[in-house]
Amino acid sequence: DIQMTQSPSSLSASLGDRVTITCRASQSISSYLNWYQQKPGKAPNLLIYGVSTLQSGVPLRFSGSGSGADFTLTISSLQPEDFATYYCQQSFSTPRTFGQGTRVEIK
Amino acid sequence: QVQLQQWGAGLLKPSETLSLTCAVYGESISGYYWSWIRQPPGKGLEWIGDINQSGSTNYTPSLKSRVTISLDTSRNQFSLTVSSVTAADTAAYYCAREKEVTGFSRGSYFYYYFIDVWGSGTTVTVSS
């Protein structure tokens, strides 16, 4: 299985802050990397697929970058609705493993 | 708009079989992959497996011996069974649509898979 490791596990930030979350794969996964947002008690929601392609309806303050084994999710200016847990997922091979999640909290 | 409605027993005893069904509304079940993902209380997401329109399945190795995902095209539904459950199987279980996007870029083909539609989740508790 490909292991996905996110950092940090949690972070505290203020409204308007620029936030960066990192995801590292245990091997190269080319550009087969997705990002999801999950709020408490809800199903996850797709933000980005293929490293950097924004899903329809996702605000432009979200962006993704990287290749190979190292990837980044950036929120350019944190909004109230962005406080949530974020997961990366590789789709290079099955099983399609997720990172352990990064919880973004209000400072 | 595609919607997934899932149901199944929420309370099981150890050694029983977990059975969940997900109905697809708004489109045919053919032409996509369909997945199951679970999330233990307070923990992260675990991909269980998927099935395509041909009935071909993929499972995560740690659960493969106990898991079956099946497709019922006549009812536009797919299902998950997990046998011999233990407390470790206590989780919220989500059904989901896995979409494939293919293309050609920088001299090579790509085949992106991602989950773009989720069910609302079913909480399953295993307790004696």
Image (tube, rainbow, N blue to C red):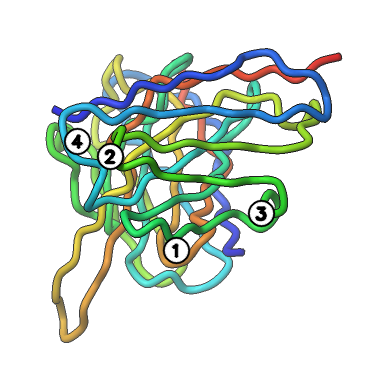
Residue type pointed to by label 1: Asp
- CA–CA distance in space, label 3 to label 2: 24 Å
Count of marks placed on residues:
4
- Res A78 quadrant in image: top left
Q: From the image, tell me which residue sits under label 4.
A: A61
- Looking at the rendered structure, whether the residues under marks 3 and 2 are on a common chain is answered as yes
Q: Position of residue A42 (x, y in %)?
A: 42, 18
Q: Nearer the viewer, mark 4 or mark 2?
A: 2
Callout 2: SS:
strand
* Same chain shared by disc 3 and disc 1: no
- The residue at which mark 1 appears reads as A70
Residue at the extreme bottom of the image, as rendered: B107
Are both tags, 1 and 4, on one chain?
yes
Q: Which residue is mark 2?
A: B116
Query: Which chain is home to disc 3?
Result: B
| Residue located 52% across and 63% down the image | A25
How far apart marks 4 and 3 lie (CA) works out to 39 Å
Looking at the image, is A24 positioned above or below residue A103? below
Judging from the image, mark 4 belongs to the subunit labelled: A
Q: Residue at x 40, y 29 (%)?
A: B22
Residue identified by numbered label 3: B64
